[in-house]
Image (cartoon, grey):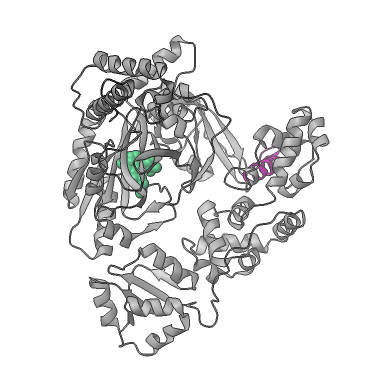
Amino acid sequence: MPAADTPAHRIAELRQAIEQHNYRYYVLDDPSIDDAEFDALMRELEALEHAHPELVSPDSPTQRVGAAPSAQFASVTHAVPMLSLGNVFDEEEFREFYARVVGELERETIALAAEPKLDGLAISLRYENGELVRAATRGDGSQGEDVTANVRTIRAVPLRLRGEPPALLEVRGEIFIEKAGFEALNARQAELGQKTFANPRNAAAGSLRQLDSRVTASRPLTMYCYGIGELDGAARPVGQADTLAWLREFGLRVSPESQLLHGCDACVDYFRTMSDRRAGLPYEIDGIVYKVDAVRDQDRLGHVARAPRWAVAWKFPPDERTTRVLAIEVQVGRTGTLTPVARLDPVAVGGVTVTNATLHNADEIRRKDVRVGDTVVVRRAGDVIPEIVRVVTERRPADSVPYDMPDSVPGQDRARRVQEIIHFASRRALDIEGLGQKIVEQLVGEGLVGTPADLFTLEAETLAALGRMGEKSAANLVAAIDRARETTLARFIHALGIPEVGEATAANLARAFGTLEAIMAADAEALERVEDIGPVVAGSIRAWCEDEGNRALVRQLQELGVHWPEEAPPASTEEGGLAGLTCVLTGALSRPRDEVKRELQRLGAKVSSAVSKKTDFVVAGSDAGSKLAKAEALGVPVLDEDALAAVLDEPAAISRWLAEPQRR
Ligand code: IVH
């Protein structure tokens, strides 16, 4: 510390005291001074820093006031992806999850860490040598937005970690607003004549995504941490419960409700207890998150698409309300399908006002017999789209008639084209900025655009002449369209809007085949070898690729300059590859199971979870149990990790094991 009696000394003293009080307040939940005393310390520090601006440092508690607005958020790539969670909705589904996990781990019982599922938004905090250097939103899981300036204003987020933090620590957690803070914020908004928020989650999201961090600073945001991303310079704690305790030592706030539970019944009890306590908690929770505690087991279980297989969110039952069906309208989807939508008398369900509910299709309307004028029960769970549960038939008007779903609607083809183009241009597809619904409707309406390919022939003058935008915006849009020519194979496939092929499947296809030509030429069998693709999806892809119109569209897009970098070509799946072979991984491997799985798949192997007569080989790590026993009983060849390494290195080597099943 600087010499006593100097401003620098007092400043250092004040900062330390303020950080300590913050820590006691937010992390230990045990403040030793009241708000007025705290404010007095802050004011003294502010005054000193004001008088000695050269002594202001970025990690000073006074620096949480926010800074002038920035133009936009920079994009951040998450080296460790930010996953989401699979959901279960009742005890039976939860027990199935538990049974699957213990089964795959070949264990009788396991420990799970349970935590409230906070209803806010996920954040990743990057601390380098203990200093907060970056905060990023989850975004699509691999890319988020840099919201550092905003997060720095949140007092529950330490600007500097306590103790001896590692060289690099990325902390994952949830930013949210407590119920009381939400009420106060809405009251203030209303007073100022500004828009109020539908629920704490929207308020938190809206507050965090402010370009002016001074606005964020005025919002009552707080945070709980629940995990780790990148880490360097320290050993990773071996379990989830240890992780939370470890984070807390660095002054990070973790939920005091989290508990380590042994066995399935304890998890069910915890859920019941928390359901009872939910209304009395100071913040909104929408379920309980259960995580397999041991990191070693987490690695064995791996993840699918965007969700870990070692964790699940058990959601609280959805909120249900009754309202009236004002009308039933038919919407046209991007593949031309007609979807009936009920227009409802607005009603608040699960924290948002619901005005529409999808009725899915003609069968669904018939099954539920929903009619215009009916009183219906509407349900909404978390971020799921609202749905009509049932009709309250006792309250049906005497003159009501069954709804007759039309086979077609006026302007259907046009509406389909509009949807197709909007999808093509959407953020997760070709990402054409500025091409919104209205402009697409106009372009299709005027006959200027009929297919996605036509977008690439548009000229700025034509756009400006539509009268909707000025010359500058027209030029910007043409530039955005031009930029979209450079894309990735995964985005391109997603953009095509092949029925049943969403973002994750498109990415899997790109990874597995490497080129568009290979995908277009693949037969159903080859398609089904790709992760998450079954007969239905494979059939849909085949049908789409065989359609001459679709093939022409793809050709045209490429001729108009749409291109992507080549993906790493998949290893030969002919000679020497593992094509046509099915294998099972069991036991603890020295590397994450996902990684091994992907390498095997790249070589053409299908990785299955159960051993059967059809299994060609099993890879067994240490502590392998019942699956290994089954493989041995069936005479299925078993490879240890050394053998696996040899095969990954030189796939042809597999023939040695297949020829001599007994050899290990
Ligand atoms: S863990 C690896 N834990 O729920 C698993 N998520 O549906 C990643 N959430 O994006 C998430 N509370 O925003 C986890 N205790 C908790 C959580 C939590 C809330 C949110 C988070 C995540 C979403 C997934």
| In the rendered image, the vertical position of residue 655 relative to residue 325, given as above or below | below
- The residue nearer to you, when weighing 446 against 481, is 481
Q: Residue furthest top?
A: 191
Q: Position of residue 82 (x, y in %)?
A: 42, 47
Range of residues picked out in magenta: 409-423
| Total marks placed | 0
Q: Is residue 212 visible?
A: yes
Q: Quadrant of the C terminus?
A: bottom left
Residue in the picture at 46% in, 31% down:
149
Q: Position of residue 101 (x, y in %)?
A: 27, 58
- The residue nearer to you, when weighing 267 against 118, is 118
| In the rendered image, the vertical position of residue 161 relative to residue 307, given as above or below | above
Q: Which quadrant of the figure shows ligand 1? A: top left
Q: Position of residue 502 (x, y in %)?
A: 54, 52
Residue 586 is left or right of residue 484, and the answer is left
| In the rendered image, the vertical position of residue 212 relative to residue 144, given as above or below | above
Q: Quadrant of the N terminus?
A: top left
